Image (cartoon, helix red, strand yellow):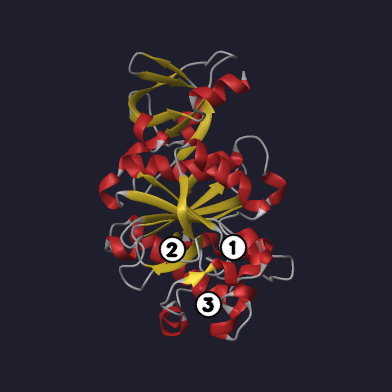
């Protein structure tokens, strides 16, 4: 398996993936013309022809038969071209000394506080390929890319996880909040936002804080809760140091998780090593290995053994990475120490 930049020729395969994903992947359009435009823009991004505010690093996961089985993305900065909205969950304290009453009421504040940060997004792996380390490779390869090019990204990385919605695309949070102001169903609003059309949010969303006690019990219950299908992605990123600090999506109330870029495990612990050809032993841990290139980026997850400042991999891995013995790689164990101990 190799993670690499998307190519224009990947359009048919990517269109099939997007159609399979359905409502789970609103940030990638199922419209062929729009998707083709995004692929062309990603190619310009990897060629360093766009500013950070417009950067869209789109990756695909390719199997050994050169079939595209997954997609993920990384944006250079959110909110610098169009407003980027979230709700921040805060607290309003009201009291009356005469009545002896004090109330602590959770409150939603509309904000743009994530402006300028970089976002992990557009993650989807074909259902029949959700086994082994495929999902972890697809997700964490983006972090190894950030470790190599930190100047291209913000001080924080964020990820908006999908919130609660049923199979028909109905969201209890949207039905209790957004529907009153937008007069459209959740799927339509989420689709417009995923296409980059966010101006309607500023035009129609109330600026006043929203008291959660006025929402339905169903809406209150899903605030900050990920969709069951997003829990594996949350688990992977939580192990890297991402945490939910009170920000939620304005449509479905899914959690917005964040981490300081320099403190993310894959970024912090990655090393520059010299590639060596050999036969890792049977107990060798799995490593994420990156060829350190931008436009011709190649990242894989393979058993490897560190010896001093060298990383020993088999010959097929070197070929996949398009490298020769002695070339420099950026690498990090796929699992942190605690996860390795559990796996053992």
- Mark count: 3
- In what element is the residue under mark 1? loop
Disc 2: which residue: 97
Above or below 162: residue 344: above
Question: Are there few (<14), some (14-19), or many (20+) residues within 10 Å of tag 3?
Answer: some
Q: Residue 217 appears at what percent x and percent y?
A: 67, 65
**Could you tell me how far apart the alpha carbons at marks 3 and 2 are, in whole angstroms?**
47 Å
**Could you tell me how far apart the alpha carbons at marks 1 and 3 are, in whole angstroms?**
13 Å
Q: Camera-side residue: 228 or 179? A: 179
Instruction: Give me the residue at 52% from left, 33% from top.
Output: 301
Residue 16 visible in the picture: no
Query: Of callouts 1 and 2, which one flags the residue occurring earlier in the amino acid sequence?
Result: 1
Instruction: Give me the residue at 44% from left, 61% from top.
Output: 93
Question: Are there few (<14), some (14-19), or many (20+) residues within 10 Å of tag 2?
Answer: few
Label of residue 192 in the image? 3
Q: Mark 1–mark 3 contact, CB under 8 Å?
A: no
Toward which corner of the image does residue 86 lie, by quadrant? bottom left
Above or below 288: residue 281: above
Q: Quadrant of the C terminus?
A: top right
Question: Are there few (<14), some (14-19), or many (20+) residues within 10 Å of tag 1?
Answer: many
Disc 1: which residue: 25
Q: Residue 303 appears at what percent x and percent y?
A: 54, 23
Q: Residue 3 appears at what percent x and percent y?
A: 50, 44
The answer to whether residue 313 is left or right of residue 47 is right
Please state which of the two labelled residues, at mark 3 or mark 2, is closer to the viewer: 2
Q: Camera-side residue: 313 or 77? A: 77
- In what element is the residue under mark 2? loop
Residue 43 visible in the picture: yes
Query: Of callouts 1 and 3, which one flags the residue occurring earlier in the amino acid sequence?
Result: 1
Instruction: Give me the residue at 41% from left, 42% from top.
Output: 143
Q: Residue 286 appears at what percent x and percent y?
A: 53, 26
């Amino acid at each position: 398996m190799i993670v690499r930049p998307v190519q224009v020729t990947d359009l048919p395969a990517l269109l099939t993936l997007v159609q399979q994903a359905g409502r789970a992947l609103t940030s990638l359009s199922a419209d062929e013309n729009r998707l083709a435009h995004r692929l062309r823009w990603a190619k310009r991004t990897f060629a360093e022809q766009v500013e950070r505010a417009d950067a869209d690093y789109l990756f695909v996961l390719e199997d050994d038969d050169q079939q595209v089985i997954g997609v993920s993305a990384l944006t250079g900065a959110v909110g610098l071209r169009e407003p980027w909205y979230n709700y921040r969950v805060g607290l309003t304290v009201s009291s009356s000394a005469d009545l002896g009453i004090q109330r602590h009421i959770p409150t939603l504040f509309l904000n743009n506080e994530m402006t300028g940060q970089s976002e992990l997004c557009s993650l989807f792996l074909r259902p029949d390929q959700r086994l082994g380390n495929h999902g972890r490779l697809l997700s964490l390869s983006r972090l190894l890319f950030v470790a190599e090019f930190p100047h291209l990204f913000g001080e924080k990385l964020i990820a908006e996880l999908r919130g609660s919605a049923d199979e028909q695309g109905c969201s209890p949070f949207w039905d209790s909040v957004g529907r009153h102001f937008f007069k459209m169903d959740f799927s339509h609003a989420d689709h417009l936002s995923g296409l980059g059309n966010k101006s309607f949010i500023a035009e129609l969303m109330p600026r006043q804080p929203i008291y959660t006690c006025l929402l339905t019990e169903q809406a209150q219950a899903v605030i900050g809760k990920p969709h069951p299908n997003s829990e594996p992605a949350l688990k992977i990123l939580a192990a890297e140091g991402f945490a939910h600090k009170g920000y939620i999506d304005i449509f479905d109330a899914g959690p917005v998780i964040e981490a300081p870029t320099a403190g993310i495990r894959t970024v912090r612990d990655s090393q520059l090593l010299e590639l060596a050809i050999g036969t890792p032993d049977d107990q060798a841990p799995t490593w994420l290995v990156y060829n350190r290139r931008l436009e011709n980026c190649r990242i894989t997850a393979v058993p490897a053994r560190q010896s001093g400042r060298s990383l020993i991999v088999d010959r097929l891995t070197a070929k996949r990475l398009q490298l020769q013995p002695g070339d420099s790689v950026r690498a990090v164990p796929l699992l942190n120490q605690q996860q390795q101990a559990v796996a053992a």
